[in-house]
Image: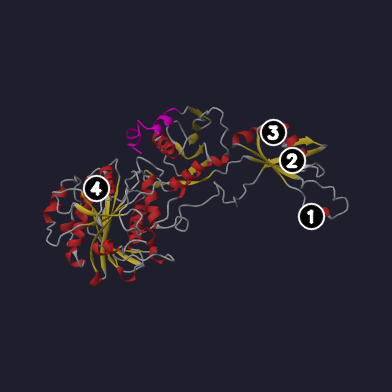
Amino acid sequence: MEFYCEYYRSSVAYKAAISMPIILQNGRRVFGPRKIANAAIPTHRCELYVARIPSQLDELGFLVWLHRIGQVYEFRLMMNSCISSRGYAYIRFTKEREALAGLEMLKHLFINGERLQVSPSEGKNRLFLSCIPRHIPISLLEESLKLYFPKMHRFAAYRPMKEEMQGIGQEKFLNRGFAFVEFADHEDALEAKKRFTPCRVRMWGADLKVQWAKPKEEKSRGPMAYRDFSTNNNVKDDCSRLRLYCLANNWSIPVILYGRSFRSRNLQYGGILIKNIFSGLHSIIIVEINVTSMSDIHLLLCELAVQMIERHSAIPPYSYIIRACSNTKAELVHLLEQNDDLYRANLEAKFFSFTAIRELLVALQLIAAHNSKIVLNMYKRAFLTHNPVATFCLDSNHPLGQFYAILPKFRNNSKLNNDFNDMEINLLLKVKEDVNTTDSVIEIKTINEICVKRAIFKAENLFLKSQKIPKIKYLRYVDIEALISKECYDTQQYINSNPVWIAGQTYQDAIYN
């Protein structure tokens, strides 16, 4: 988040972040609470617990990031000293749906190479009252407890079970002898508990015992029902996970580029570009795919990108040349430092078409050298055509600067939760058989100023899971033949003409659709 504040200095999120009052109290730094006219105090259901926070946190940058998700009511960061955090904090949004969105986004955020740990807050905000006389009606019990607990937010008591009312003298039971009193936050609950020492309340001639209630399990599927978005089983596929990583970390929209296909050899070439717009760092993943046992090569490319991101907990510092041998295994053949030592890697003999790999590398470097917003606008404008296949030219002077545009949702991917911005850029490289890419690579090398550090690289096996998803829709080739015939499109996305307009913004301009 080093450049976050500067980039968003004129945004509403930045202005909201800098307007939050700051207090240092009892070993914690508190931003807020924000006072909103005629608005109720957000409940604990709007609060998240975040751990594994780096000791040196750019607090303002983090607050700006949070305000892009929703309005933050309060941010409590636990401190060891005035300059060092204890590694955990509590974040309270003004609305439950914003807290749910924050829960999912924080699961995919990296700070200083560390992945945060986040869950709904389980702060002690409920009291358990026992030893209640069982002849007291629940309505009277609630009204009486309001006098003792004026900040009571919710109340829960239960009628006796049928089995309990069958004994002699038990037919007059009106409650189960206990109740729960819930407060808006831990501070209100603690204040109420401290009023009664030694944890007893005298009511109806009995001493009611006051204790902390044990955390209850969220069994409902309401707005804040807990879901763990960090596992493969909950996020629908690796395509969704890749978009969430890029969205949460403010990277540019991932660009998936398909290259040459050799149907007689059951081979398809493709690549992905992941780019950090702040630092300019980018990573390119190029894959030679044996499609014989593959189900969906689009999902395969996304899975490999996710694996590399999770390996480094950031944008990978390298680019990768990978061979996907089967639906369960791929081979990491070589890694490149900023893509500029390809010709010294001696990879020609390891691939069927080294030309296809060179073309993808050069084309993705060219895209990385352009402004992400310009690339997106050109991609969207490409569909304003009556031609059967949309095209656009990124650089007319470059032999690999022309592309076929593929619809963002051509695989009919599921929408992201919480209506997050799920824009994609899918392209097919427009190549000619006589293109010489040698000079092009040398030209692109001047873009990268990082020195080459030669190292002996040992090939590594990667294990794949995405191709075993049940009911997967088959996609094995993306080439001009497949585009014209719509073979590569999902049936739900099959249209006879290009759409009038493609809606979508960069991840920096909008988190939500």
Q: CA distance from mark 1 to mark 3?
A: 30 Å
Query: Which amino acid type is shown beneath numbered disc 4?
Result: Ala
* Residue ID for mark 1: 162
Apparent side of residue 119 relative to residue 314 in the rendered image (left or right): right
Please tell me in which quadrant of the rendered image residue 488 appears.
bottom left
Q: Quadrant of residue 463?
A: bottom left
Distance CA(mark 3)–CA(mark 4): 60 Å
- Nearer the observer: mark 2 or 3; the answer is 3
Residue annotated with mark 2: 209
Magenta region, residue range: 1-19
Determine the residue located farthest toward the right in the rendered image: 168
Residue that label 3 marks = 149
Quadrant where the C terminus sits is top left
**Residue 460 position by quadrant:** bottom left
Residue ID for mark 4: 368
Ranked by sequence position, the earlier of labels 1 and 3 is 3
Depth check: give the residue in front, 209 or 120: 120
Front position among marks 2 and 1: 1
> Residue flagged by tag 3: what amino acid is it?
Phe
Q: Secondary structure at mark 4?
A: helix
At x 47%, y 52%, the residue is: 229
Q: Which callout, 4 or 2, points to the residue nearer the camera?
A: 4
Closer to the observer: label 1 or label 3?
1
Element under label 3? loop
Instruction: Write the residue at 41% across / 65% down.
Output: 472
Q: Give me the C-alpha separation between circle 2 and circle 3.
A: 14 Å
Depth order, front residue of 472/120: 472
If you read the primary sequence from the N terminus, does the residue marked by circle 4 or circle 2 appear first? 2
Label whose residue precedes the other's in the sequence (2 or 1): 1
